[in-house]
Image (cartoon, helix red, strand yellow):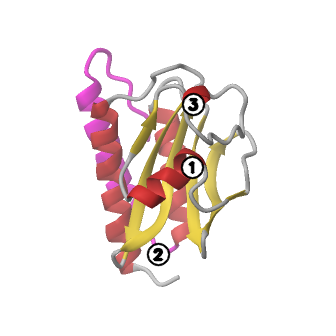
């Protein structure tokens, strides 16, 4: 029900995944449940992804949230790695080759590329959506566009729920 695999039409697949994310968030009242399902949705619908999940900003550190994949770093210090850069810059960051990214944090030695999109709540960074792939240069501008849309849906959801 929540996977999309239309051959040859990545834009349609990403649009449908975004619609499914909206449906998952509709009527949900719990942040953890929502983020857990979104991480599963993303991991199930994108090829060559070995990790998909969230880190939540608490103080100056990003703390591990719901995810799909191997165990990960439970805490990322301020400004560290691709996640820290996305928080500092307040914009998506794509590392085509994590081994060449200054300060990269290697939670999974199989990861070769990474995309991180910040989430905002009440005008401030709330956390990040973090995606890893074992393939170099895995992430496209099209995926960034649609996953940013998914993050905007999550932000709208965050404004509606109490933590």
Residue 49 magenta-highlighted: no
Label annotation for residue 98: 3
Label annotation for residue 53: 1
Q: Is residue 93 above or below residue 34?
A: above
Name the residue carrying label 2. Answer: 29
Tell me the residue at 52%/59% (across/down).
35
Q: Indicate the secondary structure of the residue bearing disc 1.
A: strand
Tell me the residue at 61%/31% (across/down).
50
Q: Is residue 29 above or below residue 64?
A: below
Report how far apart the C-alphas of labels 1 and 2 lie in the structure. 19 Å
Contact, mark 1 vs mark 3 (Cβ under 8 Å): no
Q: Is residue 39 visible?
A: no
Q: Indicate the secondary structure of the residue bearing disc 3.
A: helix
- For the residues carrying marks 1 and 2, which lies nearer the camera in this image? 1
Q: Residues within 10 Å of mark 2 (few under 14, many from 20)?
A: some
Q: Quadrant of residue 63?
A: bottom right
């Amino acid at each position: 029900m929540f996977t999309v695999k239309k051959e040859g039409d990545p834009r349609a697949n990403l649009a449908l995944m975004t619609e499914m994310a909206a449906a998952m968030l509709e009527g949900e009242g719990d942040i953890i449940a929502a983020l857990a399902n979104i991480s599963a949705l993303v991991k199930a619908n994108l090829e060559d992804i070995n990790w998909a999940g969230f880190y939540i900003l608490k103080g100056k550190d990003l703390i591990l949230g719901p995810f799909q994949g191997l165990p990960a770093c439970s805490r990322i210090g301020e400004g560290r790695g691709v996640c820290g850069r996305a928080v500092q810059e307040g914009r998506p960051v794509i590392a085509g080759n994590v081994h060449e990214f200054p300060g990269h944090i290697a939670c999974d030695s199989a990861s070769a590329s990474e995309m991180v999109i910040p989430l905002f709540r009440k005008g401030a960074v709330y956390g990040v959506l973090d995606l890893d792939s074992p393939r170099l240069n895995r992430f496209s501008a099209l995926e960034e566009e649609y996953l940013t849309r998914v993050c905007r849906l999550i932000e709208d959801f965050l404004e509606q729920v109490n933590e």
